[in-house]
């Protein structure tokens, strides 16, 4: 594995975690949304990740044996969570049903914050990997100059 491949793997992880943090932020912002343009309460979203090859164009053309099994991460898609809505008795709310209950998204703010901390730590780990690769590259240059 070369320096650029290591950078590609870490940057794919950073991009995936950034997308995940955006989805978490969207969930938290809509935790009390009872009406959307699609009708009904907001549906909690989740991110689906998948492994993806990180081959450079040259590696793809040459099918380099050393790099063939290296995988990064990519966002496969953003999916709606199938959790049932949470019902709260509030007959004065404009979105209450005939029994006086309002449907809210089943979003647990503590769970979302935990997910955000995990995503931030993964992002930071990938950023540290990039920093370490840069340090190794600079040391290799210094050895070459020596």
Image (cartoon, rainbow, N blue to C red):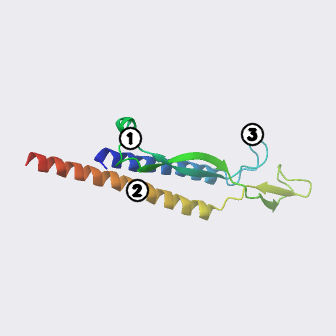
* Residue 81, image quadrant: bottom right
Task: Tell me if mark 3 has few (under 14), some (14-19) or many (20+) residues whose alpha carbon lies within 10 angstroms of its own.
Answer: few
Position in image of residue 97 (x %, y %):
88, 53
Determine the residue located farthest toward the right in the rendered image.
98
Q: The residue tagged with tag 2: helix, strand or loop?
A: helix
**Looking at the image, which residue sits at the far left?**
146
- Name which of mark 3 and mark 2 comes first in the sequence: 3
Residue 32 occupies which quadrant of the picture? bottom right
Q: Residue at x 60, y 45 (%)?
A: 77
- The residue tagged 3 is 37
Residue density around tag 1, few if under 14, some if 14–19, many if 20 or more, within 10 Å: few
Foreground mark, 3 or 2, reads 2
Nearer the observer: mark 2 or 1; the answer is 1
Along the viewing direction, whichever of 37 and 3 lies nearer the viewer:
3
For numbered disc 1, what is the local secondary structure?
A: loop
Disc sitting over residue 63 in the figure? 1
């Amino acid at each position: 594995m070369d320096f650029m491949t290591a950078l590609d793997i870490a940057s794919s992880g950073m991009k995936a975690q950034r997308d995940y943090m955006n989805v978490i932020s969207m969930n938290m912002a809509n935790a009390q949304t009872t009406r959307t343009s699609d009708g009904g309460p907001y549906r909690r979203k989740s991110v689906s990740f998948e492994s993806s090859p990180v081959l450079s164009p040259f590696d793809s053309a040459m099918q380099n044996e050393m790099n063939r099994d290296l995988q990064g991460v990519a966002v496969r898609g953003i999916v709606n969570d199938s959790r049932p809505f949470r019902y709260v008795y509030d007959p004065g709310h404009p979105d209450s049903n005939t029994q006086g209950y309002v449907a809210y998204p089943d979003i647990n703010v503590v769970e979302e914050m935990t997910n955000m901390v995990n995503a931030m730590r993964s992002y930071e780990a990938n950023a540290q990997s990039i920093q370490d690769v840069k340090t190794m590259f600079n040391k290799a240059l210094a050895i070459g100059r020596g």
